Image (cartoon, rainbow, N blue to C red):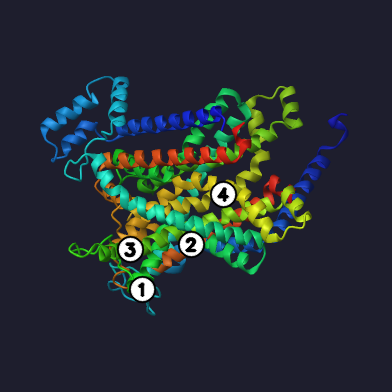
Amino acid sequence: MTAGAIPEATIRNERLRLRLKAIRSFARRFTNRPDGVLGVLVLLVFVILAVAPNLFVGDLQTATTASGASLDPPSATHLLGTDELGRDILNLTIHGTRISMIIGLLATIVTILLGVFVGIVSGYVGGRVDVFLMRITDFFLVLPTFVLALILAPIILDLIGANSSVFGIRVTLLVIVVVIGVTSWASTARIIRSQTLSVKERAFVGRARVIGSGGGHIMWRHILPNVMNLIVANTVLVFGGSILTETTLSFIGLGDPFAPSWGQVLNAAESAGALGLGAWWYVVPPAVCIVLVVLSFTLVGSALDDVLNPRLRVRR
Amino acid sequence: MGSRYLIRKVVGAAFTIMLIVILNFVLFRMMPGSPDRILLRNPNVSAAAVAAARARWGLDDPLPIQLVDYLKSTATGDLGYSFKFHGEQVTDVLLSRLWPTVILFGLGEVLAIIFGLALGAYSGWKRGGPIDYIGNGISLILYSMPYFVIGILILGVFAIGLHWFPTSGMLTIGGGDESFGSQLLDFLGHLALPVTTVAIGLIGQYSILMRSSVIETLGEDYVTTARGKGLTSGRILRSHALPNALLPAVTLIAINLGYVIGGAITVEVVFNWPGLGTLTVDALEARDYPILQGIFLLLSISVVVANLVADLIYGRLDPRVRA
């Protein structure tokens, strides 16, 4: 059989047709999960808020541009009331969307890159490399990583100074991103490794090796596309977890007061004693946003896992 | 149980603890300024104490020897001096804050395991029923809530709104001369809300875990066999499905302990409970590194030990994993 017998265009069309078919079948199976679709819709709303918060509430208010009195209850001018500095809570919450989502996104990217790299290399190379990498992975799985994050963040901040900025992103936020990433890649690595182990036994990997492909090429062109399904589902779940971790770290006082995420707003509410003063409007909006976003990520993630994970699909 | 399994698990745990201690050493070196600069910055430590600490930690020796010395002093419980607490020994500070945390999380865990596993088992058994539908929904929502958000909501409603419980602390200040009984009641009153928060935070996870474990077990062949023998479904659940579903659920609970501890620190902050969680946050604000490292060491070693215990129990109950 020679490849020349089939025109190049036919191959391309066929490939396109198969890809479209796969996408259509994925869409059909995903829309069968109403919880997943609901999650996507909620997340869409928050993404819009994160992309253009200024369209809805104007610039982020600071202590000097605060528009109201201290701890005003909700009213027509301040739909969700004000904080102790007189800043509008609706304004803070919507701008918090952007910061929480960006930190969540960046931390997710770090986590997934580390986890996928360790997982694929460990699974494909095997032997001593595998044993070594999995020892480290297990170590990070057992470790109370949140506590590690707690001591890493201030150490790094003290080393490089909290008030500098890189590419216009404040260093405090970047430190949180790195700390979340470094402490949460382990479970991703485990999942990807086990899938890599099964993919590398398939015939096409053996054939690629026979025609002389190197390890790096095989991992990049053959293993990675075949674990992509798992990566996608895992990314969504990790995203929710990252937002949760960021919220908790900021609440404890490791966030950046000049770029308030939802956790940071709750931290401010806690230090101002907002609840004791009866200022529920200071606490409820960011709390509701956190729960909505994390819940949506969990719903979308588990729906994707059901649809994309080959192991689960065979069983049903 | 097979002694090889036992030895492998114990050696693995010892190796992990070793790595944790070394990580702690490395972090200690990474800290801004050398360790003795930090000690000197602390006005509460006398010059003689600094000299003694330098000698004990061997700060003038090369790094490998320092590591050995560090391991020695850590093994004997010498974790250095706190900056914030007037130069007290870290070990003493940690010990004084330990038991409030143990009571809070011990009790919270027990409550969560009982109710979470029961809810999960029932939901999985009556899959698709109304309890499953509502229970699973609530579990998912709880699972998505940080512990401190649950704490803030509970505090707002039951302590600040309804005045049913005190808002913060462990005992009413200035109530020292009362009888033991009324002191105990006072303590329990302060304990009620934080324990409820910890329990509610965990119930969601545990019930989701148990539900999927039960569903998986109900699909096994031996359950079909039991059904074929004509056993009632209650009997099948009690003597066939539950014991087998419990095993993976309990192991996963032990593995999750590390995450639980981290998130639960914040519950103490919300209720101002004088345990390790509030200590952590105070130490963070004061950048009290010796205390932070002590907490990290204490918590991670506890988690490793808990995992080891879970592994050993699992090995005892399930002969398949011993091989």
Are discs 4 and 1 both within one chain?
no
- The answer to whether B207 is drawn above or below residue A115 in the figure is below
Residue beneath disc 2: A291
Are discs 3 and 1 both within one chain?
no
Residue beneath disc 3: B188
Q: Chain of mark 2?
A: A
Image quarter of residue B132: bottom right
Q: Disc 4 to disc 2, how far (Cα)?
A: 25 Å
Decide if residue A211 is in sight here: no
Q: Disc 4 to disc 1, how far (Cα)?
A: 44 Å
Residue neighbourhood size for the residue with mark 1, other residues' Cα within 10 Å, grouped as few (<14), some (14–19), many (≥20): many
The amino acid type found where label 2 is placed reads: Val
Q: Chain of mark 3?
A: B
Q: Secondary structure at mark 3?
A: helix
Q: Residue at x 43, y 46 (%)?
A: A177
The amino acid type found where label 1 is placed reads: Gly
Are discs 1 and 2 both within one chain?
yes
Residue neighbourhood size for the residue with mark 2, other residues' Cα within 10 Å, grouped as few (<14), some (14–19), many (≥20): many
Residue closer to the observer: B18 or A28: B18
Residue neighbourhood size for the residue with mark 4, other residues' Cα within 10 Å, grouped as few (<14), some (14–19), many (≥20): many
* Earlier-in-chain disc, 1 versus 2: 1
Residue beneath disc 1: A81
Q: Residue at x 42, y 64 (%)?
A: A286
Residue beneath disc 4: B249
Residue closer to the observer: B95 or A281: B95
Residue neighbourhood size for the residue with mark 3, other residues' Cα within 10 Å, grouped as few (<14), some (14–19), many (≥20): some
CB under 8 Å between discs 1 and 2: no
Q: Chain of mark 1?
A: A
Q: Nearer the viewer, mark 3 or mark 1?
A: 3
